[in-house]
């Protein structure tokens, strides 16, 4: 007979609880580091074609409904509002939105004499594409197509850009490649490659495995094999063209990331941490100040006082 005494009922329950807790923790870790990042990667590479609720006509803006053609043959839906002062601003929305997102910004720009080109990037709105190539050169081609269109219009002397979240990333990436983009405002630009990741706290390192799974998921799901284009490592190429970076003060991760971009970009540059605002929420919280700061930046960039 064995000399090992039988387990007590209490010991058996303790063992079962330990096994249950181990399984529970394993499931939660799998959800946090695998399932959720992969689900997010799927949503970001398949944003859907949500259409605008309004058009410039609903905002009393004169416009043309145009189609842009990218270097890889996609057609992008856009609205063109001609300028009164010779300057056109390319307006780019965030992930999952469309060209209608920026109509309020096109309005105050038009009141100040600026023209606008409001673009639905690929795989968004009424533009071509089923999957979005986040962080790749194919995505930047949308901005280059917008630059080609604006440059071909009459009475255009200056081209700038105002982008939100993903739109801000695209404008920064494009400005690093193309000097036709003379001034950039990026509101809430995030990162799209590992080079853009900022690791400064224990929490950042805890989040790293999930972020790596997310990046791997976007690369596997986007159906694109064009070059991956980092934001951070190319920012120095924009200078001496001016850059204005905006961060929502309530989003601590965004503030740290945008501040890091600000340190990397060359002069002339501006930074505004919008109080009481979340991600790309500055205009909704402080519309008058937001418009004033944007217009002051653009006026200084394009029409400096003599």
Image (spheres, helix red, strand yellow):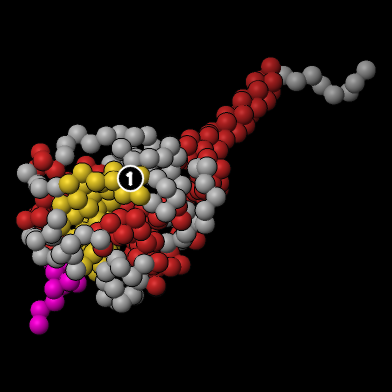
Choose top left, top right, bottom left or bottom right for residue 27.
top right
Residue 286 in the figure: left or right of residue 259: left
The answer to which of 226 and 32 lies nearer the viewer is 226
Q: Position of residue 253 (x, y in %)?
A: 37, 54
**Magenta part of the chain:** 296-306
Q: Quadrant of the N terminus?
A: top right
Disc 1 on helix, strand or loop? strand
- The answer to whether residue 303 is magenta is yes
Question: How many discs mark residues in the rendered view?
Answer: 1
Q: Position of residue 72 (x, y in %)?
A: 44, 50
Assess whether residue 24 is covered by the magenta stretch.
no
Assess disc 1: are there few (<14), some (14-19) or many (≥20) residues with their C-alpha within 10 Å of its C-alpha: many
Q: Residue at x 55, y 38 (%)?
A: 34
Foreground pick, 257 / 40: 40
Q: Is residue 284 above or below residue 195?
A: above
Q: Which residue is mark 1?
A: 76
Q: Residue at x 14, y 43 (%)?
A: 56
Residue found 52% across the figure and 57% down from its top: 227
Residue furthest toward the right?
A: 1
Residue at 48% across, 40% down: 41
Which of the image's four quarters has the C terminus? bottom left
């Amino acid at each position: 007979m064995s000399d090992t005494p039988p387990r007590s009922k209490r010991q058996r329950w303790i063992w079962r609880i330990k096994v249950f807790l181990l399984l529970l923790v394993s499931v939660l870790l799998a959800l946090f580091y695998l399932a959720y990042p992969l689900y997010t990667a799927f949503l970001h590479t398949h944003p859907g074609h949500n259409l605008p609720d309004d058009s410039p006509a609903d905002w009393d803006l004169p416009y043309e409904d145009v189609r842009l053609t990218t270097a890889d043959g996609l057609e992008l839906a856009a609205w063109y509002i001609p300028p009164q002062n010779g300057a056109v601003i390319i307006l780019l929305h965030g992930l999952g939105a469309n060209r209608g997102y920026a109509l309020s910004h096109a309005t105050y720009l038009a009141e100040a004499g600026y023209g606008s080109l409001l673009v639905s990037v690929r795989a968004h709105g009424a533009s071509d594409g089923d999957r979005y190539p986040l962080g790749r050169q194919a995505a930047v081609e949308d901005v280059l197509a917008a630059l080609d269109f604006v440059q071909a219009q009459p009475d255009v002397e200056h081209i700038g850009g105002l982008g939100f979240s993903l739109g801000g990333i695209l404008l920064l990436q494009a400005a690093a490649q193309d000097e036709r983009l003379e001034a950039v405002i990026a509101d809430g630009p995030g990162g799209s490659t590992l080079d853009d990741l900022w690791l400064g706290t224990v929490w950042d390192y805890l989040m790293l495995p999930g972020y790596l799974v997310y990046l791997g998921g976007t690369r596997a799901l986007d159906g694109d094999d064009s070059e991956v284009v980092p934001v951070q490592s190319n920012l120095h190429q924009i200078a001496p063209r001016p850059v204005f970076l905006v961060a929502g003060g309530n989003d601590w991760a965004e503030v740290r990331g945008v501040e890091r971009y600000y340190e990397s970009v060359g002069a002339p540059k501006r930074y505004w941490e919008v109080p009481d605002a979340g991600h790309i929420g500055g205009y909704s919280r402080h519309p008058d100040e937001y418009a004033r700061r944007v217009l002051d930046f653009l006026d200084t960039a394009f029409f400096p006082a003599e």
